């Protein structure tokens, strides 16, 4: 009886705590993009999600006791081609002016030289990672994956609206 | 229960046991550490703070079932009728002779525990935007789901901040309006009563056992549920 009561209490409390959450979670669901700029912003976000998924797969694999080297190697190739394509994800007009909810800062387009060099850093590190992934040295892969992630962070710090 | 207190014949008796007080203040410190470390981009520290908080919450949940009388959920979690009846007495200037959490305070405890539990659980699956930092169970979810957990982690923290403000306001209200000091008993464990409530306290070895179980579970989660 006491246990049931406690469980009930906990359920209600969790419910109450999550109501506030779910209300604001739905607040900024994007509507279907129509203009070319909005479509480009949408596509960019899809591409970044895929790139994030590829990088996460690599990082998850490297966490394991016995990483699947073939998997890492194939993802490394994907990561490199994704990084090479990245500059094409930012056509003019796909920034905040597209009215599509984007975290890309206007500086992406107003400071193209700095942006290009930030992207270049990713491409360089991703290329290195591809080479190291093919070598089979897990320790070196771990270190290099940190370097790759560092370039993500480096670019986000300057060109992406910070979270909270 | 709600007898008018007089200033005479007060007896000092133990209210909160050591494990409950240590849980409370360790939680305050670790929540502070978790907040600071995430703001300062010290992810390593943030993870350690999170593991500590997970261990504390697990301990408190078990202690709420098997701990000392004043720490047990069955003692202080009351139904809506009793809670509402207590809420109606809030405007009285006296705090009454309530032993331990009052019905509203009991619900506040449950809400804070639930919010912090959801904070820890969402953190376990969270993935940051750079894909560099992630919770120990994030390899079980996709990148997008991990990002969603990150958002929930954020929302849940908003809920915690709200509950903490409510908690502190309630303590201030009891101190200033009802002249009841709730802070000192949570530090020393002792409080003055009209009559000794003669509370039963769980032995220390039981607290050690529960702490061991909580630590083991936390360690298992840290290892990504792998042994």
Image (cartoon, coloured by chain):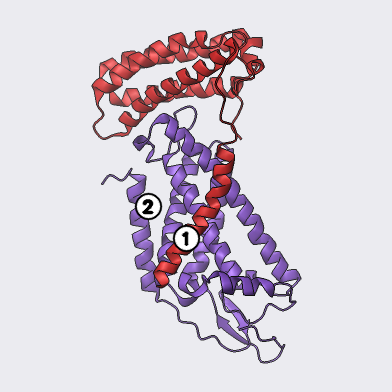
Q: Residue at x 60, y 46 (%)?
A: B158
Q: Which chain is purple?
A: B
Dot 2 alpha-carbon crowd within 10 angstroms: few under 14, some 14 to 19, many 20 or more: many
* Residue B17 seen in the current view: no
Spot occupied by residue A134 in the image (x, y as percentages of width and height): 27, 15
**Quarter holding the N terminus of chain B?**
bottom right
Instruction: Indicate the quadrant where residue A70 lies.
Output: top left
- Which residue is rendered at x = 29% and y = 25% of the image? A138
Question: In the drawing, what numbered circle is on residue B95?
Answer: none
Q: Would residue B54 appear left or right of B177 to someone viewing this image?
A: left
Mark 2 touches mark 1? (CB < 8 Å): no
As drawn, the label of residue B218 is: 2
Few, some or many residues within 10 Å of mark 1 (<14, 14–19, 20+): many
Q: Write the residue at 36% across / 72% down.
A: B205
From the image, state whether disc 2 or disc 1 is nearer to you.
1
Residue B208 in the image, given as x and y percentages of width and height: 37, 67
| Chain with red colouring | A
> What secondary structure is found at the residue carrying circle 1?
helix
As drawn, A82 above or below B82? above
Q: Is residue A27 left or right of residue B48?
A: right
Q: Is residue A11 left or right of residue A108?
A: left
Q: Quadrant of residue B124?
A: top left
Q: Chain of mark 1?
A: A
* Percent coordinates x, y for residue A63 in the rendering: 32, 33
Q: Which mark is residue A10?
A: 1
Q: Chain of mark 2?
A: B
Q: Nearer the viewer, residue A63 or B93?
A: B93
| Residue nearest the observer in this picture, A108 or A91 | A91
Seen at 34% across and 31% down, the residue is: A60
């Amino acid at each position: 009886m006491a246990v049931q009561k406690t469980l009930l209490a906990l359920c209600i409390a969790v419910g109450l705590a999550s109501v506030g959450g779910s209300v604001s979670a739905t607040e900024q669901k994007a509507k279907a993009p129509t203009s070319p700029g909005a479509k480009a912003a949408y596509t960019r976000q899809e591409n970044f999600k895929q790139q994030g998924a590829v990088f996460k797969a690599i990082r998850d694999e490297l966490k394991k006791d016995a990483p699947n080297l073939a998997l890492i190697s194939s993802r490394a190739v994907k990561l490199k081609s994704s990084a090479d394509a990245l500059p094409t994800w930012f056509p003019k007009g796909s920034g905040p002016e597209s009215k599509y909810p984007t975290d890309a800062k206007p500086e992406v387009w107003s400071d193209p030289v700095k942006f290009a060099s930030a992207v270049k850093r990713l491409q360089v590190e991703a290329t290195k990672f591809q080479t190291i992934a093919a070598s089979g040295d897990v320790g070196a892969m771990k270190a290099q994956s940190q370097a790759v992630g560092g370039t993500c962070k480096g670019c986000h710090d300057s060109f992406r609206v910070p979270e909270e | 229960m709600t007898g008018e207190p007089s200033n005479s014949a007060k007896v000092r008796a133990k209210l909160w046991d050591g494990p409950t007080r240590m849980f409370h203040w360790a939680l305050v410190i670790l929540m502070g550490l978790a907040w600071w470390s995430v703001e300062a981009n010290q992810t390593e520290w943030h993870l350690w703070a999170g593991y500590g908080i997970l261990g504390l919450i697990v301990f408190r949940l078990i202690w709420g079932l098997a701990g000392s009388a004043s720490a047990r959920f069955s003692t202080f979690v009351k139904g809506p009728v009793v809670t509402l009846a207590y809420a109606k007495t809030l405007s009285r200037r006296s705090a009454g002779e309530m032993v331990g959490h009052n019905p509203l305070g009991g619900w506040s405890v449950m809400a804070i525990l639930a919010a912090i539990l959801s904070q820890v659980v969402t953190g376990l699956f969270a993935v940051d935007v750079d894909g560099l930092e992630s919770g120990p169970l994030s390899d079980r979810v996709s990148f997008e789901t991990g990002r969603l957990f990150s958002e929930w982690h954020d929302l849940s923290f908003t809920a915690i901040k709200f509950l903490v403000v409510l908690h502190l306001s309630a303590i201030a209200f009891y101190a200033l309006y009802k002249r009841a000091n709730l802070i000192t008993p949570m530090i020393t464990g002792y409080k003055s009563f009209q009559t000794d409530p003669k509370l039963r306290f769980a032995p220390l070895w039981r607290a050690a056992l529960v702490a061991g179980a909580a630590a083991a579970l936390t360690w298992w989660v840290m290892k990504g549920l792998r042994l």
